[in-house]
Image: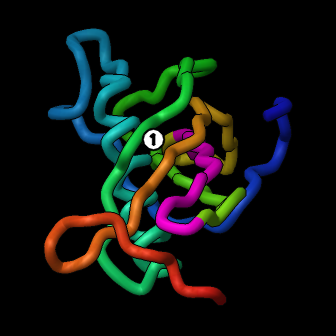
Amino acid sequence: MTETSEPCGELTLRTLAMPADANAAGDIFGGWVMAQMDLACGIRAAERAHGRVVTAAVKEMSFAKPMKIGDTLCVYIDIAKVGRTSMVLRVEAWAQRYLSHVRERVTHADFIMVALDDSGRPTPIPAE
């Protein structure tokens, strides 16, 4: 993905970065950001698959900007590809800076989600 000044995809999750999510310097843990991205993927992929989904893989992720305590994390998702039992979601995490309208992209990655049946086996994703 190229650097953009506006988020790409559908806003799927917004949450506030709290002190418990940060190190001693007030920087939010990267793992917390990634967990929120994974949560948003689960929401969006389950809606598309009309059922249970799991994360199969996350492609390369690097952090361009830090999140700080008080920032609002906004996760945007675009479903890039739907296969037989899996889908690729392009995910962008943006920080809306505390008490401002400034938004900066923190990180982005492709998440691969797999649809599962009640027995936990991959199942076909229905056509739209």
Which residue carries the number 1 mark? Answer: 71
Left or right, 30 with respect to 5, comes to left
Q: Is residue 86 magenta?
A: yes
Principal secondary structure, stretch drawn in magenta: strand
Q: Outermost residue toward the top?
A: 25
Q: Give the range drawn in magenta.
A: 84-97
Residue 46 rendering spot, x and y as whole percentages: 40, 74
Left or right, 64 with respect to 66, comes to right
Q: Does the magenta stretch include residue 75?
A: no
Which quarter of the figure is the N terminus placed in? top right
The picture quadrant where one finds residue 70 is top left
Q: What element carries label 1?
A: loop
Q: Is residue 104 above or below residue 55?
A: above
Residue 31 rendering spot, x and y as whole percentages: 31, 28
User: Is 19 in front, or is 7?
Assistant: 7
Kind of residue sitting beneath label 1: Asp
How many residues crowd around disc 1 within 10 Å: few (fewer than 14), some, or many (20 or more)? many
